């Protein structure tokens, strides 16, 4: 059974004085992320990947189509129901600094999701729970007495991951989680994410433009082009047997970089 499933999802943005300029960002997209698996989603900039992620997270509403999470329709969830769902369906952003208040100590930023989801962990156990998750991502709890600008990008991304894990999510949308990091740090973060997936059974929708990373860490790979999902294959077959001409050009362009 799929942990996350979108069916015939569509989203069009309108601009201009009379709203007569239309941009079809997501066009009849269907895909599924199986429990404990990683689905890699690739495509050039502007192909609709990030818009699809925002739709899944409920940050914007689809024009049509459905989103199911663990068999339940969450397409139109809002208010308290959506906040409760947010504990199980989380997102790791491209820019870790965007998820952290620059004027708050990291200790307070780590406590914030526990304040929002009261009752999950007893307040007197918050610091122990935080320390436990920091150990999972190999960070020293002493870092909690610093501000975001005092940590490296890799440290911040691991801290953001630890904060997500406090809520015991069942699925995480990874939106270009390593694109702002040095190559050596990228591998560390992806190895960490992969280990956590295997240990905790979390499902990932992994959005990236880096085909090598997607191939190495995904079970299946899907390709978006101009808002449409044009191809999906097992990761080990993706490079060897691309079906669509656009996919062939995408792979060729990446190999030339």
Image (tube, rainbow, N blue to C red):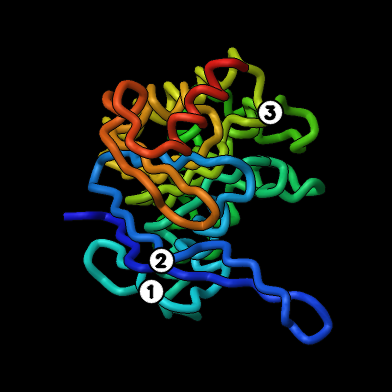
Q: Nearer the viewer, mark 3 or mark 1?
A: 1
Q: Nearer the viewer, residue 22 or 36?
A: 22
Q: Is residue 124 above or below residue 247?
A: below
Q: Nearer the viewer, residue 144 or 235?
A: 235
Q: Position of residue 238 (x, y in %)?
A: 33, 29
238 horizontally vs 150: left or right: left
Q: Nearer the viewer, mark 1 or mark 2?
A: 2
Q: According to the image, label 2 marks what residue?
A: 28
Which residue is located at x 74 percent, y 33 percent? 146
Q: According to the image, label 1 marks what residue?
A: 65
Task: Find out whether the residues at labels 3 and 2 contact each other: C-beta distance under 8 Å.
Answer: no
Say few, some or many: other residues with alpha carbon within 10 Å of mark 3 (under 14 / 14 to 19 / 20 or more): some
Mark nearer the N terminus (3 vs 1):
1
In the rendered image, which quarter contains the N terminus?
Answer: bottom left
C-alpha distance separating marks 1 and 2: 8 Å
Task: Find out whether the residues at labels 1 and 2 contact each other: C-beta distance under 8 Å.
Answer: yes
- Residue 199 visible (yes or no): no
Q: How many marks?
A: 3
Q: Is residue 148 above or below residue 135?
A: below
Q: Quadrant of residue 93?
A: top right
Mark nearer the N terminus (1 vs 2):
2
Q: Quadrant of residue 96?
A: top right
Q: According to the image, label 3 marks what residue?
A: 153
Say few, some or many: other residues with alpha carbon within 10 Å of mark 2 (under 14 / 14 to 19 / 20 or more): some
Q: Position of residue 247 (x, y in %)?
A: 44, 35
């Amino acid at each position: 059974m799929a942990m996350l499933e979108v069916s015939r999802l569509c989203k069009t943005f309108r601009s201009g004085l009379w709203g007569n300029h239309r941009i079809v960002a997501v066009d009849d997209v269907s895909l599924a992320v199986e429990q404990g698996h990683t689905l890699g989603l690739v495509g050039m900039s502007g192909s609709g990947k990030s818009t699809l992620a925002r739709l899944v997270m409920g940050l914007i509403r689809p024009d049509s189509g459905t989103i199911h999470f663990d068999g339940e329709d969450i397409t139109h969830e809002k208010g308290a129901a959506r906040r409760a769902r947010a504990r199980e369906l989380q997102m790791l952003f491209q820019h870790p600094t965007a998820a952290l208040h620059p004027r708050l100590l990291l200790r307070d930023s780590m406590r914030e999701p526990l304040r929002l989801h009261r009752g999950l962990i007893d307040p007197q156990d918050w610091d122990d729970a935080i320390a436990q998750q920091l150990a999972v991502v190999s960070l020293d709890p002493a870092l909690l007495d610093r501000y975001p600008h005092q940590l490296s990008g890799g440290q911040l991304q691991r801290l953001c991951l630890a904060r997500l894990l406090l809520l015991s999510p069942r699925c995480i949308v990874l939106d270009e989680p390593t694109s702002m990091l040095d190559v050596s740090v990228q591998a560390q973060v992806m190895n960490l994410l992969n280990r956590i997936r295997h240990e905790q059974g979390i499902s990932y929708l992994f959005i990236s433009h880096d085909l090598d990373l997607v191939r190495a860490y995904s079970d299946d790979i899907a390709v978006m082009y101009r808002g449409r999902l044009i191809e999906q294959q097992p990761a080990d077959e993706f490079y060897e047997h691309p079906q669509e001409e656009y996919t062939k050009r995408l792979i060729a362009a990446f190999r030339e970089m």
